[in-house]
Image (spheres, rainbow, N blue to C red):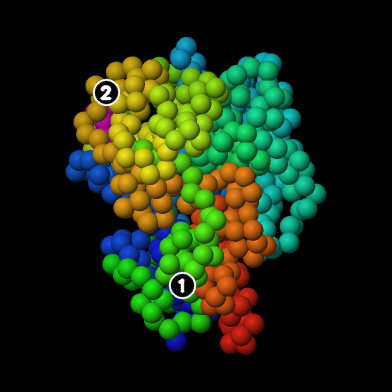
Amino acid sequence: MLDAVVVGAGPNGLTAAVELARRGFSVAVFEARSTVGGGARTEELTLPGFRHDPCSAAHPLGVNSPAFRAMPLERYGLEWLHARLPMAHPFPDGSAAVLARSVAETAASFGPRDAGTYRRLVEPFLPKWDVLLRDFMSLPMSALPRDPVTLARFGLAGLPPSTWLMRRFRDDRARTLLAGLVAHVIAPLDGIVTSGVGLVFALAAHARGWPVARGGSQSISDALTAYLRDLGGSVHTDYEVKRLDDLPPARAYVFDTSPTALARIAGLGSTYAGYRYGAGVFKVDYALDGPVPWTAEEARSAGTVQVAADRAEIGAALHAASREGRAPDAPFLITVQPSVVDPSRAPAGKHVFWAYGHVPNGWDGDLTDAIERQLERFAPGFRDRVLARATSGPPELAARNANYVGGDIACGAVSGLQLLLRPKLSLFPYATKHPAVFICSSATPPGPGVHGMSGHNAAKAVWKRLRADGRGASA
């Protein structure tokens, strides 16, 4: 009998498997698709030689992840590549605010009236960033805080809505960039803890950047898989699980799935009936004949580019998709241009690029024209560079990855108490009412992103249970 079976080979499932295998437990992973990866895959979606990331492409939380940093993933081919700027936010006048590795450069891009405010906001946390991030990403009860004082200070700044945080700034450049950071988790700007979301993304950039993985996000998943196999674990693809009886006998079952899928497979009834899914996204992957012709020079050297005229436009786009049930007329776009720093992603002189905007959950329309109109505002002539495009709305995203229910790439609405207490109100979110069944997907704390910490935290709950049985390996 195996010690643990993991269902789903996304970053969290693979991380959970690695953490258990590192502690001497026997582990097998079962994945429905033909390759591992979940939200961290790389495929030729458009033309031969153009390698796209169907979902996540830039990894501020990955490079900062306490779980990943504790593993020798570089031995298994993972290499982080950094553009000159982690992120840029261009404006219609051709200027841009930037999120740079340097706090000073970032602050200067906001203008003299807000530069000091930004420095005073972020600089106190940077010397203790690693401890703060570990504490923040280990909550609610997987570990006691290592620095409760700094965590409490961060809480005072991060718990209020981001609309409160923006009041500290006098001009719209800083407010717009910060609003865009919050929108990365598809959170309404006026939700609780959204100030903390923006701060985490900003601090991550200053600490270690917003890199891409050489060769694509698949490199992260492949490195985790290779490490797991070296530890004695096994991975089985093309293996769809519809009920627990489809799996081999094990002492624990760990699910990197949506809560509703877990309930269906494990027979948990209405356990997660109140779990809410959020807005979906509409994504376009592009093969380009050259770099994106951004008007703002800063955007040309950034790995990630946020696209919206101002904070009000970001808020209106999120409100339309999340609360009005319609696609926004001017979508807020998150874009990534990996080949700015990784030429292996496209043939010589060519580029890969992706952009997505927010739409209602389950929306089946086509946002391509609205996305490209928005891009043309900030990169005139963009359409002339397009060689091919691959579009994915909510139905296509959900078909490719069952965790993206209705196109929700966060695997659950990141709003209200569900931002922190997910998938249900519990101090032990990784356990279920079935004593041998656990959940480790991004529907659990600390939530969405390719960082593996949900898997790490869940694995901790699993090995404590296995040790309590009296047959566990020593930690």
Q: Residues within 10 Å of mark 1 (few under 14, many from 20)?
A: few
Q: Nearer the viewer, mark 2 or mark 1?
A: 1
Please say whether residue 288 is one of the residues in the magenta stretch: yes
Quadrant containing the N terminus is bottom left
Upstream in sequence: badge 2 or badge 1: 1
Q: Is residue 456 left or right of residue 131?
A: left
Q: Residues within 10 Å of mark 2 (few under 14, many from 20)?
A: some
Q: Nearer the viewer, residue 169 or 279?
A: 279
Q: Position of residue 360 (x, y in %)?
A: 42, 38
Vertical placement of residue 470 versus 156, above or below: below
The amino acid at mark 1 is: Gly
Vertical placement of residue 204 versus 435, above or below: above
Q: Position of residue 102 (x, y in %)?
A: 60, 31
Q: Which residue is mark 1?
A: 267
Which residue does the image show at 46% across and 61% down from the upper left? Answer: 260
Q: Residue furthest top?
A: 93
Magenta region: which residues? Answer: 286-290
Q: Which mark is residue 383?
A: 2
